[in-house]
Image: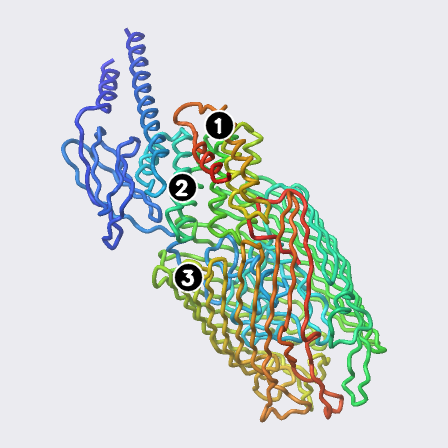
Amino acid sequence: MKNSALIILILLVSVFAKAQNASYQKTMDDLVKQISETDRQSSLQPIINKMERVAAAEKNEWLPKYWVAYCYGIEQFTKSDAAEKDLILDKADKYLGDAENLSVDNDEIMVLKAQLASARLAVDPMSRWQTYGASFSDNLKKATKLNSNNPRIYYLQGTNLFYTPENFGGGKAAAKPLFEQALDKFNNFEAKSSIYPNWGKVESQYFLSQCQ
Amino acid sequence: MKKLFTFITFLFSINGFSQVIISGKVTDKKGEPLPFANIQIEGTYDGASADENGNFSFETDASGEKFITASMIGFKNFKKALSISSGKLKLDIILEESINSLNAVVVTAGMFEASDEKKMVMLKPMDIVTTAGGGADIVSVMQFLPGANRVGESEGLFVRGGSANETKTVIDGMIVQNPFFSSTPDVPQRGRFNPFMFKGTAFSTGGYSALYGQALSSVLLLNTMDKQGDNSNLSINANMAGLGASYTHKGWITGTLNYSNLSPFFSLVKTNIDFEKVPQGMGGSLTINQNLSKTSSIKAYTTYSTNQSALNLPTYEADNSTYIFENNNQNIFTNTSLKNTYGDGKWVWLNGFSYSKNKDYLNIGVAVANRGDERTQFRSVASRLFGEENSSSFSFGAEYHNIKQDNIYNEYFLSLKDNYTAIFAESEFYLSPKLAGRLGVRAENSSVISRSNIAPRFSLAYKAGKYAQFSLASGRFYQNPEKEYLYLDKNLNFEIADHLILNYQIIKNLRTFRIESFYKKYNSLIAEQTVQYDPNPYRFPTGSLSNTGKGFARGFDVFFRDQKSIPNGDFWFTYSFLDTKRMFKNYKEMVTPYFASKHNLSLVYKQFFTPISTNIGVTFSHTSGRPIYVYGDNFKNTPYTKAFENLSLMASHVKMIKNQFVVFYATLDNVLGRKNIYGYRYSNDGKERFEVRPPMYRTFFFGINWAIGELNGRSKEADLDF
């Protein structure tokens, strides 16, 4: 009797856990879709809030934290004041740091770190290239070491060159092969699931079209 | 068994019985709604974002004792226990502002900070090398900041009526014994350090922290770079005055070598100085910068240099005769610091060691004279961070210096040894995001004069609006008498200055406006008993000495900088007003010291032209006349020199080819060719006087810097390294 009760309990708990898991998957799935569908003019904050709630409830999952950091990296573009941008990026850094604690040696996290470094750089390039320029290239290097097939590495390198003047070794011509390489990698890239990072393809296509 | 079923029932009860609607409004303390605040039932996905009126409403399946949380950027997290049963729940939430870079007040009185970490940034390494008229020299550019008084014929920072001696240069907490190349009469020298060594500079014009001492007026705090990436690269530079190379290996070790020789420069530029031997020198440095672990890092810097020069200086006698002043200098400086953090960064422990030795082998006319300085110092500072966001801190520490100085002049041998110890404690704390204070105390002992002192320091800052703040700083500052006095008399006491500074600043979107007024009172300055006043600043003191000198300095300064209005442009304006009088040295009356000028004004403008990747800079500076005191002066009816004025231009052009990065730069100083005069020197009988002129009137300078290797994702702003 005792044994069967235990079995029932285990069964029930596992069903319950599954249900919980399914709800995580579904919620994340919806949110990740919404992120890619939101146009860049409107605020991502409502979606970020939902994602933050998932991140708070699912303490051991790195993905919600990753996506919060990603969204804040985009959200800061809606602000014009340097201090406000920094405050948002502080929050992004914090979430990404928490994600890294849950998932070490993760190339996607390194790529996003580089992305956030370039956002910091853009706030005040004149005085920040020395710190954040180094952090940008460092993190991309680490990402390449972990997974050189991550297409976002090449996409970020491409955008960096795209916005660098020709006299400084940048320009459209220099950026073009990197976007091509990124797209090539995207064609062979499959995200582990729909809630894993899969951004950058549309962006690469757009930038490539601008390089013609 | 029963228990088990209850538990199972409980599990189901979580998963969907009654739905409860929770609604309310989120506001700040003043009742302003907070749109987009995030509300959540802890441990569930249930929650909502506040709408534009701060209202929220959501359904939840949760029941029982739960926590409700609310969060928003710039505000403290809110958490409250909530008993959820059925029906509707109404809850209004008030969020409290957190201390952050947007709203936090910063102690700014007397301080010009510039680093990446601080948001109230004023002047960074890149600003230093792109400022026309600054010659990529840290201190020269600082002279365009409020509070500094330009004194053309000598190096150093003269701050608010203080002499250059009253400013100390501090690298990573350690006092730099010889921040400038060795002094030569009436020829100003450059600083020894490259601006790019430092991630941040903070220039204090008074009221500075208890962590530093031995400076009556000002400290220039330079903090060296942390490790930046792990790239290797080589950089070569050549200009009209020398050659240099620098190699960085995997980001952690850098070696530099340089050779300087001003011959090419003086073959093209007319100089007012009669060089017997054109200044030349060699040097090298080694820098190690490594993160030993996540919580520990080391920085070690060692440099050695040797320089020679010889010039014919006028004797200032009627026959226009000259004498030779030859200097062979050797300088060693090392600085090592170790930083450890403990307890999630709540404790920071900094340890430093520094050794420096400087030797000047001089031939002055027929006399042989040597000057020597040696300083060994240890410093240890522990800081405990506390409060919200670790915004407050308590620091305490100690330093010890062993100083040896000597001077040989023919048969005279003068020397001193000093064991200087200091202990200090300071706390920076927030009473609210709007109100911050800093309270510190420093105690010092100097063995050479067998004296001790205790110096309190106090600062307060209040945020008056979103972008504006007031700040106040005051304190007492002690300094040992100058070595020339200590050689003769070791029974002297510390010199004293008391500061009071009031500051208002408004920083909004890359525009800064700052106004500061100050009052400084000097006491116990060294005074000499002499028969007659001798205006020669290089004279060796004679006569009996005492701490009976005194003085004051008061005034205000205004600073405005705009990096916003003109795209890719940067403009700043500085005006300083100074009213100061002293009785010290061999002065017979309370008068304005010879180095002080009433008005200092500068205008700096820089423009980057992206299509041609060229930066153009223009600087104009004006310094009103300084008092002229003559031999045997009675200090009545003092004449003034004519105002000093300078207009300089600079341009730099950048080119990048694959992994090579080339910067061309050129400067034109004193474009208008104005014949500035810094004062007069007198013949021994005081009857003849001669102008002190700048080394050159109109000058130009150009050079190139070539970097090869992996560069750190550099953007359009180049690596200008003179």
Per the image, the residue denoted by label 1 is A186
Front tag of 3 and 2 = 2
Q: Which mark is residue A1?
A: none
* Disc 1 secondary structure class: helix
Does any portion of residue B495 appear in the rendered image? no
Q: Looking at the image, which is closer to me, B643 or A169?
A: A169
| Three-letter residue code for mark 2 | Ile
Co-location on one chain, circles 1 and 2: yes
Q: Looking at the image, which is closer to me, A44 or B394?
A: A44
| Three-letter residue code for mark 3 | Ile
Labels 3 & 2 near each other (Cβ < 8 A): no
Does any portion of residue B304 appear in the rendered image? yes
The residue at the point 29 percent across, 40 percent down is: B38
Q: Position of residue B541 (x, y in %)?
A: 71, 81
- B385 left or right, relative to B175: left
| Three-letter residue code for mark 1 | Phe
The residue at the point 61 percent across, 59 percent down is: B652
Q: Position of residue A209 (x, y in %)?
A: 47, 37
Per the image, the residue denoted by label 3 is B507
B682 to A49, vertically: above or below: below
Per the image, the residue denoted by label 2 is A74
